[in-house]
Amino acid sequence: MADAKDSLKRQNYFDLKRDEFMAMDEYLQSPISEIDLRKMNEGGIATIEDLTKPIGMSFGGSVDELGTLIKKLELQQILPLDLIDKMEDMNSSEIDNLHNKYIGSK
C-alpha cells in the first residue's frame, strides 16, 4: 500500500507541476502531497486557493496538528526505526517530548 501511495505522490509531483517550485523529497514529506492525494481521491486536484487557505480552514485541521506533523517529519530523519514505528501511537504531547529530547525546542 505504501508503495502505491508513494507512486501516486511521485506522479502528482510532476502532473501538478510541483516540480516547478519544490524538490521531490521536500514534496513527498510535505502536507501538500497528502492534500493532493485527498483531492485526487475526491476526483479533483488541489488548487492554489486550497493550498493557500489558512491551516485551520483546510480539511478541519489545526495549526497544532501541523506543528505535530512537522515534528514527526523532523524526527523521522534521525530516529531509529523502532522509535519511528512507536510514534504512530503517540499523542501530540508525547511527540513534543520526543522532539525536545532529540532535537530541542525551537
Image (cartoon, rainbow, N blue to C red):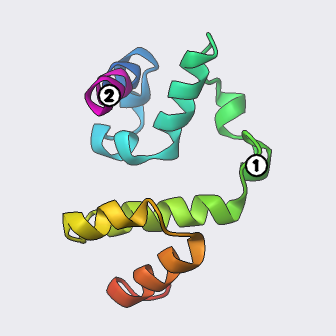
Choose between 14 and 85: the one closer to the eye: 85
- Secondary structure that dominates the magenta span: helix
Residue 23, position in %: x, y? 31, 40
Q: Which residue lies furthest to the left in this view?
A: 80
Q: Is residue 3 magenta?
A: yes
Q: Is residue 104 above or below residue 11?
A: below
Left/right placement of residue 28 relative to residue 45 reads left
Residue 68, image quadrant: bottom right
Residue type at tag 1: Pro
Residue 29, position in %: x, y? 38, 47
Left/right placement of residue 104 relative to residue 54 reads left
Image quadrant occupied by the N terminus: top left
Query: What separation in Å lies between label 2 and label 1 (alpha carbons)?
Result: 30 Å
Would you call the spot at circle 2 few (<14 residues within 10 Å), some (14-19), or many (20 or more)? few
Left/right placement of residue 54 relative to residue 4 reads right
Would you call the spot at circle 1 few (<14 residues within 10 Å), some (14-19), or many (20 or more)? few
Q: Is residue 87 magenta?
A: no
Question: What residue sits 56% from the left and 69% below the top?
Answer: 91
User: Which residue is labeled 1 in the image?
Assistant: 54
Question: What residue sits 31% from the left and 23% below the top?
Answer: 4
Residue 58, image quadrant: top right
Tally of marks: 2
Q: Is residue 19 above or below residue 43?
A: below
| Residue numbers of the magenta segment | 1-9
Left/right placement of residue 69 relative to residue 24 reads right
Which type of secondary structure does the marked residue at label 1 adopt? Answer: loop
Question: What residue sits 51% from the left and 78% below the top?
Answer: 94
Which is closer to the viewer, label 2 or label 1? 2
User: Which residue is labeled 2 in the image?
Assistant: 1
